[in-house]
Image (cartoon, helix red, strand yellow):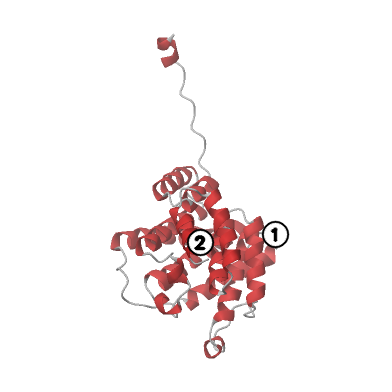
Amino acid sequence: MLAAAGCLPALAAEPATLDEALRSLYNFDFPAAHATLDRYIADHPQEALPYAFRGSAYLFFELNRLGALESEFLTDDERLVEKTRPQPDAHVRKQFQQAVGDAQARAETTLQANPNDRAALFAMCVVSGVTTDYMALVDKRAMGSLALAKRSNGYAQRLLKLDPQFYDAYLTAGFSEYMVGSLPFFIRWFVHFDNVEGNKQRGVRNLELVAGKGRFLGPLAKIFLGIIDLREKRPEQARKLLSELAHDYPGNPLYRKELDKLAAVR
């Protein structure tokens, strides 16, 4: 019987999916996220989005290593610009740059053939967004990242004009709205984002839409909303969001750590 079993054909592995890769990413299981993305890219080498998500995985790995995802860091403007944090990892930087370059090249090729390709526009939105975050949070060049943030918002606005139900794109639009609304007036005077008024409440509504209906970026929208709640002194709302994230992604210790901090200040 065992000999016969050895002659049976091996079962084919389940195809890798981007949803599976992002689940590993939100669990901070970076090796699993990369392994899934590698399998997906092997089957879809010309798609831009998996390379953009590969860049996201390198970004989150580096932010976690640097402690730049801690609530104290994200809610304290002085810490956002401090220069004394650990230095970026040069190898991770190279891998990040390669991933976003691969994504951008494929997306731009697709958009040259079809400027309204939704997947390519979304990939460019993600690429511009993660590059903005790397510049602001890793390279500590917050003001210099504004141009990239404007670019990311531009792709999001183009995509939403084509398809208002592409809910993940509201994350960039919502974050842009909240960010511009949080800038000092003298900076906001010189900064113009397409279709962005600096209405923080509108920004929060857009993020809530992604949290409820986004396919890929719903958990990230919850993270952003939790940060906003902490900045706006709404700990109960932040606690609710963190509890949902800790339940859905138990492999990520950051959510539980932040919940413990909130419990300690009750």
Crowd around label 2: few <14 · some 14–19 · many ≥20 (10 Å): few
Name the amino acid, label 1: Gln
Q: Quadrant of the N terminus?
A: top left
Task: Report if residue 102 is visible in the image.
Answer: no
Task: Report if residue 75 is visible in the image.
Answer: yes
Determine the residue positioned at 52% across, 87% down.
Answer: 187
Which of the two discs, 2 and 1, labels the residue nearer the N terminus? 1
Determine the residue positioned at 40% across, 66% down.
Answer: 68
Q: Where is residue 262 drawn, in percent x and y?
A: 50, 64
**105 or 92, which lies in front?**
92
Crowd around label 1: few <14 · some 14–19 · many ≥20 (10 Å): few
Q: Which mark is residue 263?
A: 2
What residue would you read off at disc 1? Answer: 165
Mark 1, secondary structure of its residue:
loop
Q: Is 184 positioned to the left or the right of 78 in the image?
A: right
Q: Which mark is residue 49?
A: none
Compared with 129, 219 (above or below) is above
Quadrant assignment, res 120: bottom right
Q: Residue most toward the top? A: 1
Mark 2, secondary structure of its residue:
helix
Q: Where is residue 103 drawn, in percent x and y?
A: 47, 58
Q: Where is residue 176 drawn, in percent x and y?
A: 57, 73
**263 or 16, which lies in front?**
263
User: Which mark is nearer the camera, 2 or 1?
Assistant: 2
Compared with 36, 209 (above or below) is below
